[in-house]
Amino acid sequence: MMNTVDPAKARHDRIERWRGDRRLLVGAALASLVTLACGYLTGHGFGALLEQFRTTVIDSVFDDRGDGEPPYGPIWGTIGLLGCLAAGNLASAAVRRYQGRRSGPAFPVVLAFAASTLGLWDSSRGWLPPLAVGTAVDPVFHEDEKWGFWAWFLYYADWWAPAFVLVLTFLALWYAVQVSRHQAELARTRERLMRHGRRVPAAIVEVKLRRGGDESGTRVVGADVTVSFVDLSGVRHWVTRRTGDTAIAGAEVLFDPASPDDDKKIFVALRRHPALSDWLPAN
């Protein structure tokens, strides 16, 4: 089939057309709300599963007080976990395309952990109390046993389990802030170089394919590409960039003419008509 439009240019225009489109922000907001809801289900479902295990330890396997209830909690928790992964990835991808960056923000992870904390806390408020504190009561054979360390540990799970997930939430928040700062710094450097830097063609020197993704390890999942370019003083430089895109169709380099040796100020594009998100920073 013949086409009169350069597919590389069409791709560039399509990506740039979506950059800054507020519909992506609306989609990211909706996906974030779904992430919150699914995160709550995940935490609540995990709490229901933890309660079942806790009850068998602090009482006995013959404690049938909760046997009449269908195990909907863990099922909804599994659905919530899958929903978190899908909605979180959608939210991150929408913001990535809106900003024109190579990777999306990590904030959906924070939303998922925060909502899971709330769901686990809510679930733990309704856990069955032990038949007798300090004793695993056997209502069938009446062979009661005193609690050991593990039983006491799980007895207080309604407090430490939500607290543990809350700590994970703060760690995820710290990580998301660090990632956001790093990405913002890269974006500022790239935008400055797009205005005041130099963009020159580069030669592809070496391509090392990265394989994996299945048991055979034969599927190509990316490449480490080494390119060379000549700065304004006639000095040749070599830089290596890692990419998950195997559609390599030439190379260009964007660099700071005042400091051509600074790897952090060198961006490499491996496509014709690269979009803003195609420029690869230092690893």
Image (cartoon, helix red, strand yellow):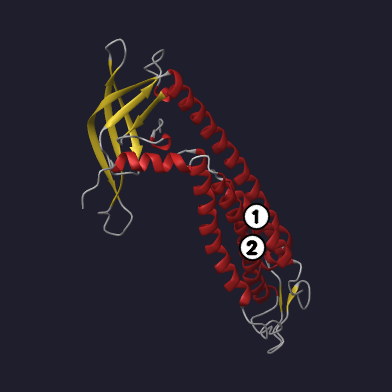
Neighbours of disc 2 within 10 Å: few (<14), some (14-19), many (20+):
many
Left or right position of 28 against 268 = right
In the displayed structure, would residue 51 be above or below residue 174? below
Looking at the rendered structure, the kind of residue marked 1 is: Val
Name the side, left or right, on which 108 lies relative to 128. left
Q: Residue furthest front?
A: 4
The one nearer the camera, 17 or 72, is 17
Label 1 vs 2, first from the N-terminus:
2
Point out the frontmost of discs 1 and 2: 2
Q: Position of residue 2 (x, y in %)?
A: 21, 49
Left/right placement of residue 47 relative to residue 204 reads right
According to the picture, the residue beneath numbered tag 1 turns out to be 165
- Element type at marker 1? helix
Answer whether labels 1 and 2 touch (C-beta < 8 Å). yes
Q: Is residue 120 above or below residue 169?
A: below
Tell me what residue is drawn at x 58 percent, y 42 percent.
176
From the image, tell me which residue sits under label 2. 43
Give the number of callouts. Answer: 2
Q: Is residue 238 visible?
A: yes
| Element carrying mark 2 | helix
Q: Is residue 207 left or right of residue 33?
A: left
